[in-house]
Image (cartoon, grey):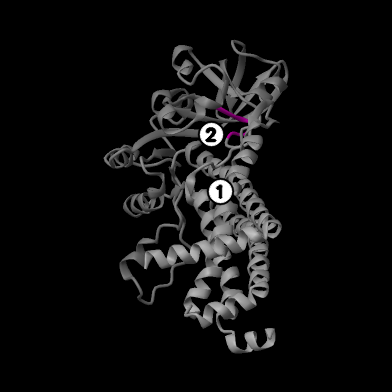
Amino acid sequence: MIGRFVFLVSIALRHLLRRRRQTVVAVSGVAVGVGFFLAVSALMVGSQNDFVDQLIESAPHIIVSDELRSPSPQPGARVFGDGAVDLHGYKVRTEVRGIKDWSAIVAAADAIPGALASPSLTGGVTLRLGGHEEALAIVGVEPEIETQISTIEDQLRVGRLRDLEKVQGGIIIGEELASRLGVNVGDIVAASTSTSKARSMRVVGLFKKGQAQLSSNSGYVLLREAQSMLGRPFIINRIGIHLSDPYAAERVAARLEQRFGYKAESWQERSSEFLSLLVTRNVIMYSVVSAILLVASFGIYTVVSNSVSDKQRDIAIMRSIGFSERDLQLIFVIEGIVLAAIGVVAGWMLGYLLMEILGSLRFPIAGEEESIPLDRGPRQYAIAAGASFLAGVVAAWLPARKASRVDPVDILRGAV
């Protein structure tokens, strides 16, 4: 059985070697298709993975806020349920914003293996310097915990988040805001709210420009400093939670929201619009690169089809001496597989070269030279090879099927 298969392979190889020019053209077509498939998919998938990584790591995986997805039911509606109750003219009690019993939520989050929760308080202040005023959204944090659940510290041009603990009244602001105020690290600005007097704040750090997750009018202070400045002692309105498995965020967020009632947003929910766009982007990308491989398969079809046409008399002779339809189909399918295999290997080399060229390029992004993120994993190589072999087998099988069904008597009679 093995010897017969080797014999059929030798026949297929002789067919290809006798038509060297067409063989080279077909192999080149597959190689170019595979090479550009690898380059395009590495570029698209790499940029997507980099974008998702930034979504996951730039902010906590889950954010619990002092909001409710739906208002609490009135006591009358809660007591009578679906009874004939009509409530009107009631006065809603004004409640102080903030997360009640927030320490229980933090404890519940910390109890999850590999999870870490960081409480914070957000609010608005006004910075003043020399008659110039700028609105600033401050976030009060515990630096030691915050550095473990987000990449905020990586976005600092100058300073560290822990510098907030070393300087009384320390504040970290963005480079753009600092430029508008005319301040630098070490300078003092006045900060006030509508309910508090102005106090002096010393700039201890600057965020880089162009950070998507940070507004140019955002700043960080110590949690206790924010509570004092905003007049909300012992109150927090935001809990950030970091998980060991980011993709479990939706499940954990739903469980925390059901237990405590406060709105818990996973990173998937916060970025749902972007993630849906990525799905559309992937469909377009794989449609385009698949079309490239499909076009390349036409070269294999042409070579095998011409081989069938040229070998009509040989086919008839082989049929007459005992070759079965299956043997003839296998010969021409082997031709397609060989062409696809050589083209895939050459395409891998071309794709690797194209990725090296793309990886060496540098582009100015937010004032810094950044390289293009590429996905060089084996998955793309496997997809390109699998798609090429499938296209090659189908392209070769179509003319091979036709060749195996010819009547040898008709061919030999016509050749006489």
Residue indicated by mark 1 = 345
Say what secondary structure mark 2 lies in: strand
Of all residues, the one furthest to the front in this rendering is 416
The prevailing secondary structure element of the residues shown in magenta is: loop
**Magenta extent:** 214-219
- Residue at image position (40%, 29%) is 148
Q: Mark 1 or mark 2, which has the lower sequence index?
A: 2
Q: Nearer the viewer, residue 378 or 26?
A: 26
Query: x, y percentage for residue 332?
Result: 56, 69
* Mark closer to the observer (1, 2): 1
Q: Nearer the viewer, residue 49 or 390?
A: 390
Assign the N terminus to one quadrant of the image.
bottom left
Task: Identify the mark at residue 123; answer none if there is no mark.
Answer: 2
Give the side of residue 32 with respect to residue 113, left or right. Answer: right
Assign the C terminus to one quadrant of the image.
bottom right
Say what secondary structure mark 1 lies in: helix
- Residue at image position (53%, 69%) is 331
